[in-house]
Amino acid sequence: MPKIFVTRKIPEAGISKLKSAGYEVEINPADKVLSKDELISYLKKGKYDAALVLLTDKLDADVFQAAGPQCKIFANMAVGFDNADIEAAKKAGIMVSNTPGVLTNTVAEHTFALMLAIAHRVAEADRFTRAGKYHGWEPMMLLGTDLSCKTIGILGLGKIGSRVAYHAVKGFNAKAIYYDVKRDENFERELRATFRATPEEVLREADFVSIHVPLLPATHHLINAERLRMMKPTAYLINTSRGPVIDEKALAEALQNKIIKGAAIDVFENEPAIEPALLKLENIILTPHIASATEATRDKMTELAAENIIAALSGQTPPNLVR
Ligand code: GLV
């Protein structure tokens, strides 16, 4: 019976799928991230045929080597796969898959939750109210910014970036501009969106900049002090992609010095650590990497990871093989 290792407790849906396929499933009994040594020791001992892994698992050559020649696939329960060294996996003869598509709506919704919350000062207003500071309606109290009819700038036009643009245009009558390494003329026609040849042009024009790029050497610190200075002082920055895309110290300084109006981020440069200066600011909203965290979506992510394992162990190409 093929044996699967799951690196941490996950929603049951994917586990049931693996068990129904006739596999033996072993789950890390401690509900915590395994250290590299612990992961290697599990893999060496268990001689698994596949592993269902998380974005908090760092998958390098040592880890793939430890998995052994019988191991076919590491199915990452995330759309992003910057936690895995894909070349090292290939060298070890192990496939890696991800979970695109099933989380698109949820991440786009969370992006809007952040965008609207920062522009309408929701978290700040909640803190204000709980602190007993509300003594009656005031014409000038906690004034925010509308999203409607503004320019939204999308950096990275993948599935999630396009869905965010769709909601902004269809739901808020916003104007969409975008930068991506690839131009998408269908998208432009559908949403009357316009392409910008550089991220800088998007940063200069947009009232709301929403980041949806993968983490690559080319996108590390895509947003740095210099680029923050290109943004309008009235603009907001939203990030639901990966933390290291933003230089967090530079963001803290930009927010302190009112270089931009506000930011709302779900991901951090050195997770789970957060730049301490950010925690002191009112003009930022911070959520703990939960953009895909709805019950339904997390179920679907585990199911898709399981489907990739089932395909790999049946001798097929996994539907979401990362190449
Ligand atoms: C979450 O960050 C994911 O990549 O799915």
Image (cartoon, grey):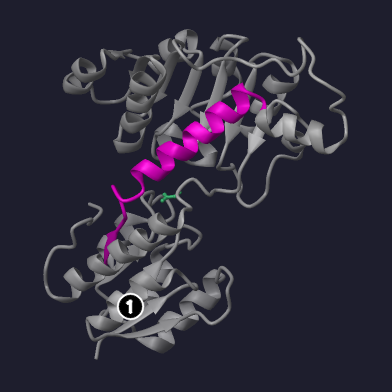
Rendered location of residue 297, percent (x, y):
39, 55
- Of residues 66 and 16, the one nearer the viewer is 16
- Secondary structure of the residue carrying numbered label 1: helix
Q: Residues within 10 Å of mark 1 (few under 14, many from 20)?
A: some
Residue visible at 39% across and 57% down?
A: 296
Task: Say if residue 93 shows up in the picture.
Answer: no
Residue visible at 54% across and 17% down?
A: 227
Residue visible at 54% across and 40% down?
A: 243
Label 1: which residue? 16
Rendered location of residue 46, percent (x, y):
39, 87
- Of residues 9 and 112, the one nearer the viewer is 112
Q: Is residue 104 magenta?
A: yes
Q: Is residue 148 above or below residue 51?
A: above
Q: Is residue 80 above or below residue 34?
A: above
Q: Is residue 285 magenta?
A: no
Task: Say if residue 243 shows up in the picture.
Answer: yes
**What residue span does the magenta drawing correspond to?**
94-121
Rendered location of residue 239, percent (x, y):
51, 33
- Of residues 269 and 103, the one nearer the viewer is 103
Which quadrant of the rendered structure holds the N terminus?
bottom left
Q: Residue most toward the front?
A: 136
Residue visible at 46% across and 73% down?
A: 7
Left or right: where does residue 190 sit relative to residue 55? Answer: left
Residue 74, quarter of picture: bottom left
- Of residues 172 and 111, the one nearer the viewer is 172
Q: Is residue 321 above or below residue 18?
A: above
Name which residue type carries label 1: Ser
